[in-house]
Image: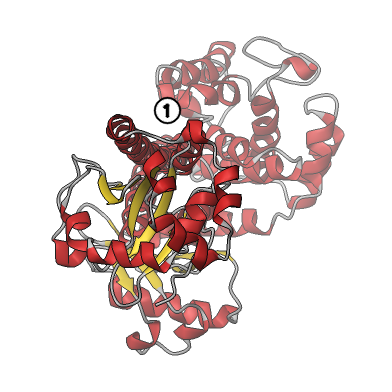
Amino acid sequence: MTPQTTHACPTPTVPNRLWQRLELLGVSAVSWTPGSNARVRVQTSGQWLAELIAASPAFLMQLQSMASELTESGAAPLQLWPGLWVMPLAPQRRRQIAPSSRRQAAMMLAMFVGQDLLDGEQLYRVCDAAGVDRGYLLARVDRHALLTAPEVHRLARTVLWMYEDAIDTDRHVGELQTMTQQLGDSYEELSLLYKISSNMTVNQSPGPFLANTCEELQQVSGLRWMALQITDQDSRLDELAGKLMVVGEHSADPAVVQDVGRALFHRYAQADKVVLIDQTESLGIDRLTDLAEHLLVIPLRQKDGSPLGVLFGGDKRDGTDIGSDDAMLCDALASSLSIFLENLLLYEDMQAMFMGTLHALTSAIDAKDSYTRGHSERVAMMSRMLAQAVGMNPQEVERVYLSGLVHDLGKIGVPEAVLTKPDKLTADEYDSIKQHPTIGAQIIQSIRQMDDLVPGVLYHHERWDGGGYPEGLAGLDIPLFGRVVAVADAFDAMSSRRAYRQSMDHDEALTEIHRYIGVQFDPQLATAFLQLDFTAFYEMIEQHKANDYIHVGS
């Protein structure tokens, strides 16, 4: 049997640093595989004598003959020939492996050479096998590096300690790298969770929030693509109902993704845990395999179990399978989406109740005068249209709308006889009427959620030229909300029949608005108002008239 002797890279179980240190100590290391295919590999470099010995058939045969002793000796040096010792490199703290198992695997051996090897007959065999002249070999040997028996045993203990320390160090390094990776993953997860939570406010636009959250989750989870299918069974979701959001990269037709989203929703919306599908073809969903081979599906549900949607994504970018860690991460972060959607529904409920209360209150005030019924609602609508026309942001537009809705709230403190008087008002009665902006502002400024509406309520009777009330403000000193509501209020007042006069027709009312540009009204706002489409306004007037008839008939 001819041994295979090569310089090999260190085995993965033995750190590189150990070979380097053994070379510095002048100790050779070999890898020996027992059995029928026995072979020896030299692990340390630059030690030519060890290479000659390891290449010798006699050396391999001696190892084979002492296999039992070597595999059962623990960690003590054994003398193979006079002046040649080998020691298995196995830490004493390591659990012992059955000899029958150990014989099947490579064994790492430290090799120690002493003076007696140079004088023994085994060296002749080594030289003959290698075709090297013995005299030439003896001339090259550094005799100061040769060991005595006591030195071998002392050095063997040192080598063993080095081996054990190197193994322990590598294990700790590996554990540290694993922990570092886990900490890195946890940091990304926590960062994403913080990012989602900090952006999760119901007064923002929900569509971009949900899309951005899906994109962040897709990136952190390593999926190629991710999609969110929202339920179409709750009208409170408004434009989100039934919507599908897709992020990442896929080659499927958008219509296919829509069909898959609906199919997954109907199948998994009521599931109580994350679903992992290894082979999408097993689901029998048409063309799902065009999207992905592996699929992750997470149901989004309210606390009462009602479905909100399903979050699903396919295939890892690195080609690995979607694992339980990915599922746990996505499930944890998907909970934030469920919370956001549920809060959105609660917010819509609160908003509907709030708006219903405001409409009921303003309707009650308008009802004090049958001639002005619906006035507040129409002023609110026209204020919103004007705010949109001049480019106010969506949040301001809605607050202007609410300002218009409650602008006459203060009339609750004005006697009904004054409000409905068909004749000219006395000075005292007119002063009473002029108090309603102040009364209204006092009512709503105590409500924290409405205190930003105060300018529209308090200043909607101020004039651009400073001749209005209650404070006689002029020009841009009048808050914007007050200037917007003022135009809409005046137009509706002129377009409505009052106890003391008939209503103006459309052209007459617009002519009056134009005539008082820069006098009563903000020039920019009044000019924009004249360009509005008044179709909805007159439709609302007809609706209010019809409601009046129904009320009288009943």
Which one is nearer the viewer's eye here, 297 or 491?
A: 297
Considering only vertical position in the picture, is 317 above or below 169? below
In the image, what residue type sits under mark 1? Glu
Quarter occupied by residue 2: bottom left
Q: What quarter of the picture does the C terminus occupy?
A: bottom left
124 left or right of 510 in image: left
Task: Out of 408 and 174, give the one closest to the viewer.
Answer: 174
Vertical relation: 257 (above or below) 217? below
Q: Where residue 461 sits: x, y (%)?
A: 65, 23
Quadrant of the frame with the N terminus: bottom left
Please report the residue visible at 50 percent of the width from the left and 39 percent of the height from the top.
23
Q: Is residue 12 visible?
A: yes
Q: Position of residue 37 (x, y in %)?
A: 35, 76
For the point 43% across and 27% down, which residue is it?
449
SS at badge 1: helix
- Estimate how packed mark 1 is, as few (under 14), some (14 to 19) or many (20 or more) residues with alpha carbons within 10 Å: few
Q: Which residue is mark 1?
A: 416
